Image: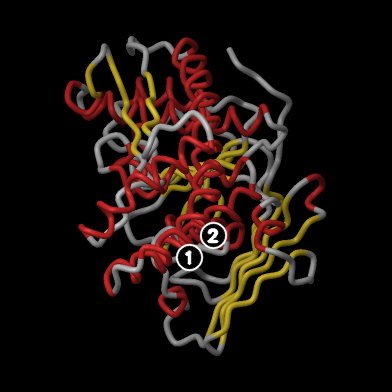
Amino acid sequence: MHSLPSSQPLHRLRVRDFRNLESLDWRPSVGSHLILGANGAGKTSLLEAVYLAATTRSFRTPKAAELCRHGAPGFHLALAVGEGGRTELEYGWSGGERRRTVNGETRSLVDHLGCLPLVLWTAAEKELLTGGPAVARRVLDRAVVSLRPATLAPLARYRRALQQKRELLHLSNDRLALESYNEVLVDAAWEIQRDRRRYIEQLNLAVEAVRSEVELDLPPLTIEYRASPAAPSLEALRSAWTSAAGRELEQRRPLLGPHRDALRFRWHDRELRQVASAGELKAYGLLLIVAQGRVLEAAGRPPLYLLDDLDTELDPERLAILWSAFGPGSQALATSSRPAVWDLDGVGGVWSMRKGALTPA
């Protein structure tokens, strides 16, 4: 069984005027924490607060005004993270302005993202194995950035240039202008696809290691990364984009690039979503989450797991097996509205969430 020394990425969480949460100053210990409560009690909002403060993004809405407690003009979140909790991340919104700091200073977004590695499971992540390629790309890029925050830079360059290229193709047939955008895009695309490919190679190894450890009869899973286009070198990628320029001008849309990459999850040479049951899909999804954490651990960045409604579609036996895969040395915050399916002896801290208030269970 995989084991590592106990890590505590998150030492303290403070919340004020966020969603339906009561003001909170919480110091979770190392290890796992289970937050129990009815739907609407504030469990997901607690995980969202951690995620937002660490990444500057909500996993539920892009609109900061929706995150304020009813009647409040803004909100404030603070995390003490890292070794000894010596790094403080703050994120707030008030008067239409966002503010984020690291130890009281405004730092680059890359620096901010580097402070607390996260692995997230929500209802949206369930679609990774069954949804379209856009879902897979979003989850993949989030994992790659968590591993190496500097990869945010080529992603940002690519997205800006891609939007400009789309506008150009919609309005003009200017071949020279198209080629100038492609020069910017192809360099960023090469970095993005290289980082995605390397990550999937690491993830495949980690998934197989986790699968071999758990006491579930699950066939091997292979993750295939399909780049658009599949090019062995930067020169080959640039050539493919040059060759596609005429068709892009004709069809007035970008036809190649990381925004068209896809993942395939293979099980016995068939796509997983075509043959696996709902329970098997959930089991594989959680194995992927554990594997993401293993990749971060191997890079010296032990993560905090945020696991919303972890137990849905799982019976008590399978839940206990999958929960054990996270390992006693991991720090995890899991939510549930089904206390009866949990073996509470296998959980470090158990908490109750009711009407936005968090108390020991």
Please state if 76 lies on the left or on the right of 5 as rendered.
left
Give coordinates of residue 35: x percent, y percent.
48, 47
Mark 1: give few (<14), some (14-19) or many (20+) Cα within 10 Å. few
Mark 2: give few (<14), some (14-19) or many (20+) Cα within 10 Å. some
Q: Identify the residue under disc 2.
A: 157
In this view of the protein, which residue sits in the foreground, 322 or 116? 116
Give coordinates of residue 222: x percent, y percent.
38, 19
In this view of the protein, which residue sits in the foreground, 127 or 132? 132
Q: Quadrant of residue 16?
A: bottom right
Report helix, strand or loop for mark 1: helix
In this view of the protein, which residue sits in the foreground, 135 or 5? 135
Give coordinates of residue 294: x percent, y percent.
59, 27
The N terminus sits in image quarter: top right
In this view of the protein, which residue sits in the foreground, 352 or 319? 319
Which amino acid type corresponds to the residue marked 1 in the rendered image?
A: Arg
Residue at 64% over, 57% down: 26
Give coordinates of residue 201: x percent, y percent.
51, 24
Q: Identify the residue under disc 1.
A: 160
Residues at badges 1 and 2 in contact (C-beta under 8 Å)? yes
Q: Is residue 339 visible?
A: yes
Distance CA(mark 1)–CA(mark 2): 5 Å
Q: Quadrant of residue 277?
A: top left
Residue at 50% over, 58% down: 46
The answer to whether residue 190 is above or below residue 210 is below
Residue at 35% over, 44% down: 243
Which amino acid type corresponds to the residue marked 2 in the rendered image?
A: Arg
Please state if 316 lies on the left or on the right of 18 as rendered.
left
The answer to whether residue 329 is above or below residue 213 is below
Report helix, strand or loop for mark 2: helix
The number of numbered discs placed on residues in the rendered structure image is: 2
Please state if 339 lies on the left or on the right of 144 as rendered.
left
Q: Quadrant of residue 227?
A: top left
